[in-house]
Amino acid sequence: MIDLDIDFYRKWACQKMIESSQSNIWEGHWTCAVIALTKLLEEKLVPVSLEDLIRKNLVKTVDEHANEQQYRINKEYEGFPAQLMKLLVQNHHTCHALGHDVIYTFYLLSTLSRSDIPATVELFDAMEKIVRGFAASGPGFVTVNGENIVIDPDGIPNTGSKLNLTPEAVLDLLDNFQRPLQMEKGDMQLGHILTHGHAIVEMKQAYRNYIHDNLDPAFYARINILTYANTLEENWVESDMAITETELNPLEPSYWEQALAESRHGHYYKYAYSYLRLCRMSGRRPTDFRSFQRIL
């Protein structure tokens, strides 16, 4: 049994976000990965028999992506959640880098809200730099015909698809959205639809006084992009979800053994947390993981 000091990992995650802002904002993926793993354990979303394997993934992630310094709790930033929400919604009508501005913010706020660890001025400055960096990076690329291209969300038809973003709606979208396997393997868009949608659902519940429905338009824009991208794909190969070499199910040891070998930038952890958390929020008992597996 590996001891789990949740506050250690929370502080590690805060420091990783600070250091990511100073070097490469995409390194914040590891903040989200560590928080996802701790939440799977805290919220008991997986069987007890898997806890040791998840802890091994957690220890490996922290060891392989070590911070240069420890989180310095000096000057606390007053009103951190409210100010971060205001920052996030300044450009809420456009979709930034696959929704990572929203995803990063959700993960950080969710772990701080369950602890006594204060958010510092340094952490807010880091998040401000990261959120603005994602806004400047554009909507992110989409894989079409084997190439990664950028589709301007303002230059394509509007499908008019607007969901009432609930846990059930995000899960249904994951199950029902048709996308060729080779496109999904190229860019993991559906996986980010899952984590982006989950982040919005959770923040609308926790911070309804600040955000209401103003994070939804960016999500709708991303659905428009994926719908349009499908029309451009010339070699449409349907993914056969019924036929897989090995079924990867986050409620089974094989999933976490595979993640231990290759976590794919922590996506194995974030996808599992979002999926299982949304299932719990919606009251669903996951039994068929074929639609989930296609995003891995």
Image (cartoon, grey):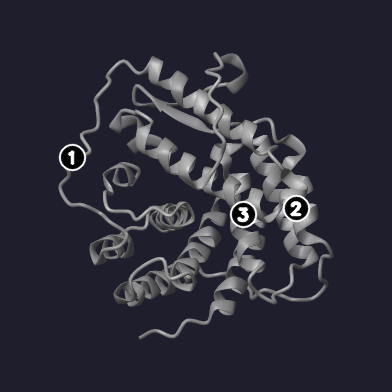
- Please state if 134 lies on the left or on the right of 236 as rendered: right
Q: Residue at x 34, y 28 (%)?
A: 178
Contact between labelled residues 2 and 3, with CB atoms less than 8 Å apart = no
Q: Residue at x 39, y 53 (%)?
A: 284
| Disc sitting over residue 132 in the figure | none
How many residues crowd mark 2 within 10 Å: few (<14), some (14–19), many (20+)? some
- Please state if 84 lies on the left or on the right of 166 as rendered: right
Contact between labelled residues 1 and 2, with CB atoms less than 8 Å apart = no
Q: Is residue 228 above or below residue 170?
A: above
Q: Nearer the viewer, residue 72 or 203?
A: 203
Helix, strand or loop under label 2: helix
- Does the image show residue 150? no
Look at label 1 and name its amino acid. Ala
Question: How far apart are the alpha carbons under marks 2 and 1?
Answer: 43 Å
How many residues crowd mark 1 within 10 Å: few (<14), some (14–19), many (20+)? few
Look at label 3 and name its amino acid. Phe
Measuring from the top left, give residue 159's x and y in whole percent.
52, 18
Q: Nearer the viewer, residue 123 or 69?
A: 123
Measuring from the top left, give residue 140's x and y in whole percent.
54, 33
Contact between labelled residues 3 and 1, with CB atoms less than 8 Å apart = no
Question: How far apart are the alpha carbons under marks 3 and 2?
Answer: 10 Å
- Pick whichever of labels 3 and 2 is earlier in the sequence: 2
Measuring from the top left, give residue 49's x and y in whole percent.
29, 76
Q: Is residue 14 above or below residue 55?
A: above
Q: Residue at x 58, y 67 (%)?
A: 13
Q: Which residue position is annotated with label 1?
A: 242
Helix, strand or loop under label 3: helix
Look at label 2 and name its amino acid. Leu
Q: Which residue position is annotated with label 3?
A: 106
Which is more foreground, mark 1 or mark 3? 1
Q: Which residue position is annotated with label 2?
A: 84
